[in-house]
Amino acid sequence: MIIDTHCHVDLYPNPKSLINDLERDGILTIGMTNLPSHFKMGYPHVKNLKKIRLALGLHPLLASNHFQELPLFMKYLDYTSYIGEVGLDFSKDGINTKNIQLDSFEKILQVVSSKQKILSIHSRKAEKEVLMMLRKHKIKNAIFHWYTGGLKLIDEIVESGYYFSINTSMIKSINGQKIISRIPKEKILTETDGPFVKYNGRIVKSNDISVIIEYLNIQYNSKMMEGQIYENFKKLLDRISDK
């Protein structure tokens, strides 16, 4: 079974067509949202589907919207077991809103800590801060999406029980390959991060995850990584009530 733990379904050119294809092909997909207002719009379209779940998000690069969107985040918190995309971004694109991001992420973790949720985490240039905050709030279930931080910190993230989701861009870059080689196979998951990733000159599709699985089979000297990824995700699912 192909599992896409981080896909911005609502931002594809034709979300309705994509949803139908994913459901038909049996691809288990966690659809990210960047704001709670986006979750509000998308939820009615996926709530009755079998293979697609929608995550409630508050993207760090949309910090200018956080003040008005946070109440809506709290309102829809119990509609889903998936939280994403959330986190911090201290790159040049996000550093000017660092304080807003920290405040918003703190509030999210405070309310999520007592609930059974799986978080998909954005951590660009803020990996240490994200890890520290997750630990502070005793978050049990988190996936570091498209991790680009230091290699040594991977060990600490693994020790904390967290996972990493890998996309096609990562398997093509030297840095991405180094990161993957550091992650135990028991902590690997797959993602597309579509439509923000291109593959073969087009927007990535969830079916392209099969290429990641082939790469991981070589990386871990195994023919069973598709099954391993399923087992990894199932362990996360077993910790929450909404399956």
Image (spheres, rainbow, N blue to C red):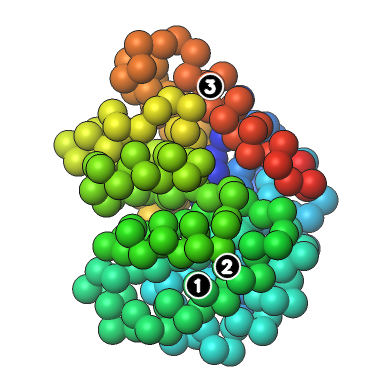
Q: State the residue in front, 126 or 13.
A: 126
Above or below, 147 relative to 234:
below
Query: Tag on residue 228?
Result: 3
Q: Secondary structure at mark 3?
A: helix
The quarter in which the C terminus is drawn is: top right
The residue sitting at 70% across, 42% down in the picture is: 239
Residue wearing tag 2: 109
Q: Which residue type does callout 2 highlight?
A: Leu
- 2 and 1 marks in contact (CB < 8 Å): yes
Q: Earlier in the sequence, mark 3 or mark 2?
A: 2
| Extreme-right residue of the structure | 48
Q: Is residue 169 visible?
A: no
Residue 197 is at least partly visible in this image: yes
**Sequence-first disc among 1 and 3:** 1
Q: Type of residue at label 1? A: Phe
Give the residue pinned by disc 1.
105
Mark 1 is surrounded, within 10 Å at the Cα level, by few (under 14), some (14 to 19) or many (20 or more) other residues, namely many
Q: Which label is found at residue 21? A: none
Residue 6 is situated, as x and y percent measured from the top left of the image, at: 51, 49
CA gap between label 1 and label 3 equals: 31 Å
